[in-house]
Amino acid sequence: MGLIRYGLRISLAIAVFVVSGCASFDPVPIEEVGFLERSQTQQQGDVTLTSAVPSAEECVQAFGVNLYKKNIQPVWLEITNNDSVRLMLMPAILDPEYFAPLEVAAAYSFRSEKVNEEVDFFFAEQDVGVFVPPGETRSGFVFTNVDEGTKSFVVELVGADHEYRRFTFFVEVPGLNVDHRNINFGELYAADEIVTHDLPSLRRVLEELPCCTTNKSGKGQGDPLNLVVIGEPLNLYYAFMRAGWDETETIYRGSLWKTTKSFIFGGRYRYSPVSALYVYGRGQDVALQKARDTIHERNHLRLWFTPLRLNGKAVWVGQISRDIGVRFTRKTITTHKIDPDVDEARNYLLQDLWYSQVLAQYSYVAGVGAATYSEPRGNLTGDPYFTDGLRAVMWLSGDPLDMEEVEFLNWEMPPAR
Amino acid sequence: MLVAAASLAPKSSKSLANPMRWLALAIVLLASGCATTYETVPPEQVPFLERAQTKAEENVQVTTAVLSAEETELIFGLDLYARGIQPVWLEIENNDESTMWFLPVGLDPEYFAPLEVSYVVRFRFAKEANEQMDEYFQELSMGSRIVPGATMSGFVFSHLEHGTKIFNVDVAGEDHDLRTFTFAVPVPGLAVDVTHIDWNKLYEPTEMVAYDRDELKEALDELPCCVTDQGGNIEDLPLNIVIIGTRDDLVYAAIRGGWDITERTASQQTDSTPIPGTDDRYRPVSIRYAFDRPQDASFRKSRHGGQPHSHLRLWLSPITVDGIPVWIGQVGRDVPVRSKSSGRLVDADDARTMLFQDLLLSQALGFYGIVKRGNAPSAVQSYEQFSGGTFLADGFRVVFGLSSEPTALADVERLQWEAPSWD
């Protein structure tokens, strides 16, 4: 448990000093790399935690090797323990599949045995370790799997007093071109376009929203708008990150190439772009996805920020579908075959948010229009779907909420399935 | 009587690469008029329910069974196991006054939707058979809303697991009560050491030593420090953990903590082909020796996608504490070997931290303590490994006392034994 930090610190320092000066492995001290300027600090009682995540380029500088290319993302932590008890860090909470420092080192092979040794010692030395004695500060890295866009993670410190100290971070990592980042939600609507509703009038308005997305010219009938989410932009963002959804890249050449590559090779490219569908005459404001084993299987959702408010809270309308395969089309090169049972994907999301403890209340509202299994409707790319015609309405909770506290508002009841 | 439907499964594209096969296929299609049929056996004719388990709580009763590979092929007419898909049968009886919702995410956060499965396994050039298949999967799949007094049954399509499948059936009531039923279901097909070893013959009754909890620390001194080669002459990786628990609790705790029980070590010499649909998750762990014999149980932890992550080897010791068996083990990471290099430095105790967290988070731990590892020096040292490379080990082992009941994190007891320098 963190043996390297404590047991070998001095001998490591000597070893690194002796073999340094090798041209092929030349990390820059982290203070000179600059990512610490983006660090965030949180305090709970007598414990202070600071965290920062270097980008791909910063990693090349700080670690002398391209970690992102191997799907490794170091998270820098500084833990100051002014409490009277020893604290233990739980890296498996931060990432259940975190890498051990020497495992990271072993992923790189240099010609010279001496340099390999230097790499081993260097990475061992970067480990944050596990225990933080009272009155002391520890800093270093935990090596996690790569998250692009915003990295959300929980740092948990268990005290010898059996108390758990939990810190949740949302850290922006430079390098990904995502939809929502380019949007200023405050400027999407003029003040006189914003309409505030109470519950009964919101229900009516939600029933009257268009059934489906359209193409760019506002024509055609695309995927059903089967989601309504109520919560502030930041709140929404945190909720979906916490539930394990990833941001997606706007379709541009670079990322399309990445998607095509992962389509051909079947890899797990988590940030593959979602093509644009239209509501309010514009493409989605937020596109998120949850990758599964391969890109052929993922859930993706699109959300639009509406001019509606419920007691001051923002209302979003959206669409979710479950991708079950990929096929080539002329328009967007590749597109996804969706599960025709779109309600299944909607119910999945409801459970997903529920289990992630970010759901406060849910309901169902009409507005999509039913389509049966035997007489399905089609979306813009010709995929058939059937639905009970309802939208799931989900109120987000700001703080993690116990699963048993979630409320059901009985507007409509979906048919038993 | 039963229809063997395997031959109807779509052939791999590789076999169609040969132009003669295309020609043959075209002729068959012309002659048969695309007569691919989808043939299945009704679930009630397949006796999997004989293995069903039932649990009841607060007016809700859940019965479940996991289909074997053969049963899956009969009922669904296709080899779903080869695709990594394992159907779990459920029956939920709602005797409560409020409506109940079954939440499949609790059973498998990445469960497959029925029409997703039927799409993945669809036939080529057989529209009618595919439509039939879609309807059949839809019909047999488990629903979600169970009104008062009703019983609902069907299949959930989960990710394939061998050995023992442990899962929750979560039922949320409109009475704001979440009922969680936990099942541990043996899945026929995987040969594992724990069911092949004759446990009563490992030790003579006279060799067994019984201690109580107060004597535990001293008792552990008698255990060997390290694994060895076959002859017991060369010491190797540290025996860096001790587990106190029954065999059932041990298997349950490990699987619940995300570790898979692996195929028999004996099979590694004869057959090392991964089981289809599971990558390397159940690949046997290589043999090391303690008590002059190979490990009694092996587990493996894999990364998402199936690459090996860590391994765990365990031996039953002749010691019991308060009547509960004591196991000694070696846990380590599977670190890739550097190409073109003999120098490899491994932290032999790193995966111990991982195992500790896994047991803690799966609420399987009742107590833990840290104790010196045999006669090893209590400081970090580097050692040569007989398979090549160098490892660092710290001279301590962590003792895990398993609890049969889920134990909240805050209730886990720490034995105040040793305080290593890194503690």
Image (tube, helix red, strand yellow):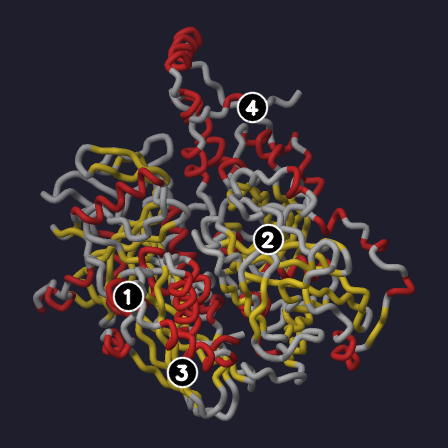
Callout 4: helix, strand or loop? loop
Is A35 located above or below residue A415 in the figure? below
- The residue at the far top in this view is B31
At 40% across and 73% down in the image, what residue appears? A126
Locate residue B393, reporting x and y percent. Answer: 58, 71
Count neighbours of disc 3 (C-alpha within 10 A) and say few if under 14, some if 14 to 19, many if 20 or more: many
Query: Taking B145 as reference, is A315 left or right?
Result: left
* Real-space CA distance between mark 4 and mark 3, rounded to the nearest whole angstrom: 60 Å
Residue A357 shows up from this direction: no
Query: Taking B322 as reference, is A286 left or right?
Result: left
Callout 2: helix, strand or loop? strand
Is A345 located above or below residue A87 in the figure? above
Are tags 4 and 1 found on a single chain? no
The mark found on residue B5 in the picture is: 4
Nearest the eye: B397 or B101? B397
The mark found on residue A217 in the picture is: none
Locate residue A225, reporting x and y percent. Answer: 26, 49
Nearest the eye: B362 or B233? B233
Residue located beneath label 3 in the image: A79
Residue located beneath label 1 in the image: A23
Under mark 2, the amino acid is Asp
Query: Taking A393 as reference, is B304 left or right?
Result: right
